[in-house]
Image (tube, rainbow, N blue to C red):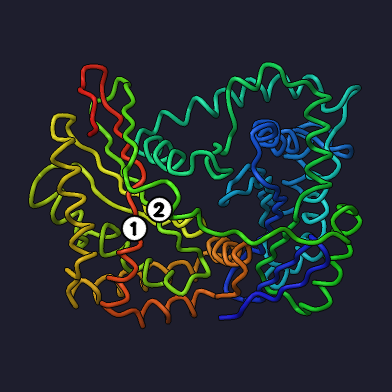
Amino acid sequence: MGEFQVYHRGRLHVHLLQTTQFRTRHLSLKVCRPLQRDSVTKSAMIPYLWIDGTSRLPTPLDIARYSDELFGALIRTNIGKRGPLQLAEVYASVPEESRAEEAQGVFDDVLKLSLELATDPLRGEDGFSAEFVKREKSLHRKRIASQADDKIAYAMEKCTLHVCRGLPEGLPRLGYEEDIEALTPAELWKAHEQLLKESDVYLYIVGDIKDSDALGERLLGQLEQQFPAAKGAVSRQLVRAIPADGRGDQPEFMTERQQVQQGKLNLGFRTGVSYDDEDYPALLVANGILGGFPHSKLFRNVREKESLAYYASSRLDGLSGIVAIQTGIEPSVAERAQKIILEQVEAMKQGDVSEEELHLTQGALANQYRQVMDQPVSRLEIHFSGTLAGIDRDVETLMKRMHEVSREDVVRASNRLLLDTVYFLSSQEGETHGN
């Protein structure tokens, strides 16, 4: 497997992965700026306005028809979030030129369109098209509201945002519904211009690249033309985990009422372990032993042995260093479920980690990452996390480091978990959970 070749100038970054593994070539343009309360909602709407039209292709239908002409190229925009950063993204994929002679030159057209979406969107009299803004304001309200439809994801989001309270990481990816009504075409256009001027820009290409150095320099030149303010500027500070200390040892309890048939009990832990931390591979393994797989402690003890949960798992956010536990329970067993969950965490801190648990988890994680190797978008996203954290660590290296983790490493990493938030989503009739 190849590794990403990196080219950068100022705040402009090009990352190329040469591979013949895939039948399609993939492009990801990420325009990143720090999350801020006064701009989070405006910035969240911008990539959806990008895909509504450009100066050359002024309607969504024009963009769709042109994409079809490019061998059915897939092009979409999205708003993302990584640690304290908000990402306006353009993603595209197109048949690999080396596998289809008639597709020669199509990738250059897709690249041109992707850059146009971000830098030359359709402009109306006072900024973005008033018609498009009106429609997107309505759609964005629905995007925000629809997050509550998936209660598992909703509860996880509410818990992790509370762990990050008072920090940029604590701002929601889509912003706030109450901001939307006052937004105007002119204000959104100004936010778009600020985004282009103030952001770090990352362009990822995965495919059968013939001359990485030549392509890298050519792409940097194109980015310089489209993002002139970024070519001479200095890149921002590296992303680090949220601090594990400074809030005391007592967690905060949150109870939210909704009409739900199944309660959601989530626990959020700060670790202070950043993606580039020496303990990161050990924390990955520790999280897997705790709640990453069917053989994990949460599944075996909370769900199977005690029959307290419909599901019980944990996950690690590599950039924020947050370990979050999620369970689906009957509201009446919340106190007992929390007790058993915390017993599993404490057991790991005290060294209750068997060689069987360690080896099963290392094997399961290795299988997960082998699957990542077959997914071009996942590979570039993992590399992007490393880029933000300042570590050039490919998937193979991470797998090797995880395989080298010992029981002692797992225990040490487990002791970095500090309970910050207990979030309980329950029905209107449920009782308040907390101490």
Q: Which residue is mark 2?
A: 270
x and y percent of residue 326 in the render?
A: 30, 45
x and y percent of residue 232 in the render?
A: 88, 61
Q: Secondary structure at mark 2?
A: strand
Q: Quadrant of the C terminus?
A: top left
In the image, 322: left or right of 205? left
x and y percent of residue 413 in the render?
A: 34, 68
x and y percent of residue 254 in the render?
A: 33, 31
Q: Quadrant of the N terminus?
A: bottom right
Q: Residue at x 72, y 75 (%)?
A: 209
Task: Please name the amino acid that badge 1 sits on.
Answer: Leu
Q: Is residue 433 above or below residue 237?
A: above
Closest to the observer, 208 or 430: 430
Closest to the observer, 323 or 375: 323
Closest to the observer, 194 or 54: 194
Q: Which residue is mark 1?
A: 417
